Image: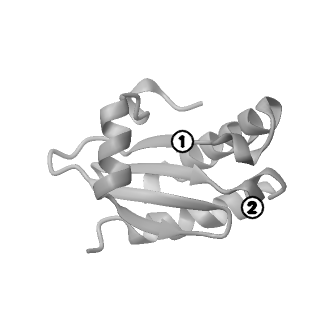
């Protein structure tokens, strides 16, 4: 479970990251990243659209992404802000595929 300080919660933050963030495409997700110059803990947000599946499937994908981001949170630099958008293929992906996508993103955050 992600602590409140590790979550992106406002619509304005989601909009800013999706519009202005650096885009990193993985096998089952696309991530929009930016580094906050004020530092702080890395923060994560998740967008799971209806095309991923029904509510049960979407919530399962969200829980898996949250667990993977919690597991890899130390690999992200301080001040990282990341929004993950799940592709429909993420519904059938195993946990290792989600971890691989997050590892790919963690290596590219902060590189401009």
Q: In which quarter of the image is residue 76?
A: bottom left
Give me the residue at 45% from left, 48% from top.
83
Residue 58 place in picture, x, y as percent: 73, 38
Q: Is residue 76 visible?
A: no
**Sequence-earlier tag: 1 or 2:** 1
Seen from this angle, which residue lies furthest top? Answer: 4
Give me the residue at 73% from left, 64% from top.
97
Image quarter hosting the N terminus: top right
Q: Is residue 44 above or below residue 98?
A: above
Circle 1 is placed at which residue position?
46
Image quarter hosting the C terminus: bottom left
Give me the residue at 33% from left, 54% from top.
19
Return the residue nearer the eye: 90 or 99.
Answer: 90
Disc 2 crowd rating (10 Å Cα; few below 14, some 14-19, many 20+) is few
Q: Quadrant of residue 90?
A: bottom right
Q: How many labels does the image show?
A: 2
Residue 107 place in picture, x, y as percent: 44, 71
Image-based side of 18 in relation to 38, left or right: right
Q: Is residue 12 above or below residue 73?
A: above
Residue 91 place in picture, x, y as percent: 79, 50
Disc 1 crowd rating (10 Å Cα; few below 14, some 14-19, many 20+) is many
Residue 42 place in picture, x, y as percent: 37, 45
Seen from this angle, which residue lies furthest front? Answer: 51
How far separated are the C-alphas under marks 1 and 2? 18 Å
Return the residue nearer the eye: 85 or 97.
Answer: 85
Q: Is mark 1 on a helix, strand or loop?
A: strand
Q: In this view, does 23 lie above or below 69?
A: below
* In front: label 1 or label 2: 1
Image-based side of 51 in relation to 5, left or right: right
Circle 2 is placed at which residue position?
96
Q: Can residue 67 be seen in this view?
A: yes
Image-based side of 7 in relation to 92, left or right: left
């Amino acid at each position: 479970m992600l602590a409140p300080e590790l979550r992106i919660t406002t619509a304005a933050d989601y909009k800013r990251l999706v519009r202005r963030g650096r885009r990193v495409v993985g096998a089952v997700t696309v991530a929009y990243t930016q580094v906050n110059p004020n530092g702080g803990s890395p923060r994560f947000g998740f967008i799971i659209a209806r095309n991923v599946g029904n509510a049960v499937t979407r919530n399962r994908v969200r829980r898996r992404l949250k667990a993977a981001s919690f597991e890899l949170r130390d690999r992200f630099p301080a001040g990282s802000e990341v929004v993950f958008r799940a592709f429909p293929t993420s519904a059938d992906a195993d946990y290792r595929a989600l971890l691989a996508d997050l590892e790919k993103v963690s290596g590219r955050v902060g590189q401009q």
